[in-house]
Image: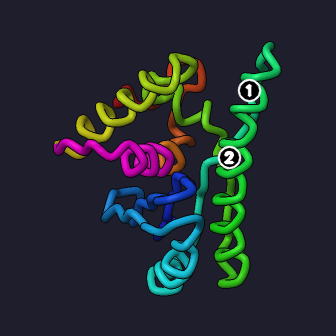
């Protein structure tokens, strides 16, 4: 695949990372209130002309307490709306778009099922390890990790999260 753009959907400031031939090119953060970033994402995709866009999917976790379910549902629904806006931009531009299961990429970076804060730290650590530079915006590091996972998923050993060639 020549050009891939990966998105971490977020309500106020989603982030995208551009990969060309499987290598990181750049990352971008979009700003706006209550989805005010949609036109910027549309124009970004129109300018970049990716072969594929991958965007993180969302799931409502199984929770026992009704209060937890209601609190979590509101944020998940907002993320689903953000993802849907990104997918709509792709549809309007004729760009193929795929969803990425969050657990798929999170297990590769060692953050899966460790809780939100530990996963965000694992994402920042993985970014720093792969690109040799720090980044404190976990939405940018997540978009990078999502794209890195997608570009390497064919060579990953499913059970270990390590590339089949031995490189992580």
Q: Main secondary structure of the magenta part?
A: helix
Residue 137 is one of the magenta-drawn residues: yes
- Which residue lies at the image location 61% right of the left edge and 48% below the top edge? 56
Q: Which residues fall within the magenta stretch? A: 133-148
Disc 2 target residue: 57
**If the image is split into quadrants, where does the C terminus sit?**
top left
Q: CA distance from mark 2 to mark 1?
A: 13 Å
Q: Residue furthest front?
A: 67
Task: List the single residue furthest toward the left.
Answer: 133
Above or below, 56 against 1 in this view is: above
Q: Residue at x 66, y 40 (%)?
A: 101
Say which residue label 1 marks: 61
Closer to the camera in the image, 72 or 91: 72
Looking at the image, residue 4 lies above or below residue 147? below
Instruction: State left or right for residue 76 relative to residue 164.
Output: right
The reply to whether the magenta stretch includes residue 40 is no
Q: Is residue 69 left or right of residue 57?
A: right
């Amino acid at each position: 695949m020549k050009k891939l753009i990966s998105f971490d959907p977020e309500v106020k400031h989603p982030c995208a990372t551009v990969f060309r031939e499987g290598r990181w090119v750049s990352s971008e953060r979009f700003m706006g209130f209550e989805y005010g970033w949609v036109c910027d994402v549309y124009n970004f995709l129109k300018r970049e002309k990716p072969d594929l866009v991958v965007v993180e999917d969302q799931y409502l976790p199984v929770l026992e307490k009704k209060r937890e379910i209601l609190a979590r549902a509101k944020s998940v629904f907002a993320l689903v709306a953000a993802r849907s806006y990104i997918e709509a931009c792709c549809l309007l531009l004729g760009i193929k778009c795929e969803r990425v299961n969050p657990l798929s990429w999170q297990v590769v970076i060692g953050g899966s099922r460790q809780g939100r804060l530990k996963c965000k730290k694992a994402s920042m650590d993985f970014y720093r390890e792969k690109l040799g530079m720090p980044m404190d915006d976990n939405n940018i590091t997540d978009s990078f990790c999502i794209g890195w996972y997608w570009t390497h998923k064919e060579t990953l050993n499913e059970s270990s999260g390590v590339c089949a060639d031995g490189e992580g």
